[in-house]
Amino acid sequence: MPRRNPRPLPPAVAVRLELRDEPAAVGSLMTALGAIGGRVRALATIRRGGMAGPEPDDPTTVTIEVEVESVDEAAVVAALNTVAEVEAIHLTRPMGKIFGKRIIVVGGGAQVAQVALGAVTEADRHNLRGERISVDTIPLVGEEHIASAVRAVADLPRARMLVLAGSIMGGDISRAADELRAAGVPIIALNMVGSITDHVDLVISDPVQAGTMAVMAVADTASFELAKQKGRRY
């Protein structure tokens, strides 16, 4: 069963790099960071850049962001300065400190909008007290599309809760829900037609309340334990 409020992540150093867009560049980057004991927790390509220099044969660059744990900023910068493919280094802030935990809402447009209303309103209350909780939504129709979205939540950085908002869900969506919960991401669903309500942690009829309780379940500044509500319907 997913735990409520897992231990906070250790501090991370976030760096934005202009990197030569060469096959071995990322490997060189990882080798340098590993040599100083850094643990890479996030690596994302932000955009393709321009030329690394004014000459026509200069290599193109790509902008990437890296988040590293277990080392300090000075050590990370020193290590990156040894990588020949790195053209520029910019220290930034980890995404966890900026956007924090994510609530993902998937389903029908009208229901998604109402869940988002409750989630954003509740998140504002906790964010004013130091939390960082963001809400991401995607209206979708069709069993295949929704099931794919549910499975993909496991791969989303910082995703801490999924809310399924719709009128009917089941079949492969229910199987996807079981897989996501096994990966450690809890699910709240609206009370709807289909088997999905037997494959989630909590069922709530009111979409605004579903969004509110989703935020309360992941907020460190709330007194609400989803584990104690498992299997209930409201």
Image (spheres, rainbow, N blue to C red):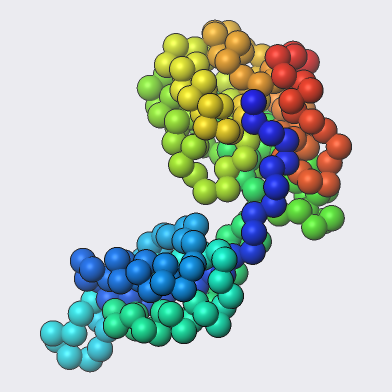
Residue 134: % across, % down: 65, 49
Q: Is residue 225 above or below residue 92?
A: above
Looking at the image, residue 35 lies above or below residue 142: below
Asked which quadrant contains residue 171, the reply is top left
In the shown orientation, is residue 170 left or right of residue 164? left
Q: Quadrant of the N terminus?
A: top right
Question: Quadrant of residue 190 in the image?
Answer: top right
* Above or below for 107 versus 34: above
Q: Residue at x 33, y 80 (%)?
A: 83
> Which residue ends up furthest to the left in the rendered image?
57
> Is any part of residue 153 visible from this angle?
yes
Image quarter where the C terminus lies is top right
State the image coordinates of residue 90 (x, y, percent, origin top left): 49, 80
- Nearer to me, 74 or 157: 74
Q: Residue furthest bottom?
A: 54
Asked whether residue 110 appears in the rendered view, the answer is no
Rendering coords of residue 6 (x, y %) = 69, 42
Q: Residue at x 75, y 28 (%)?
A: 226
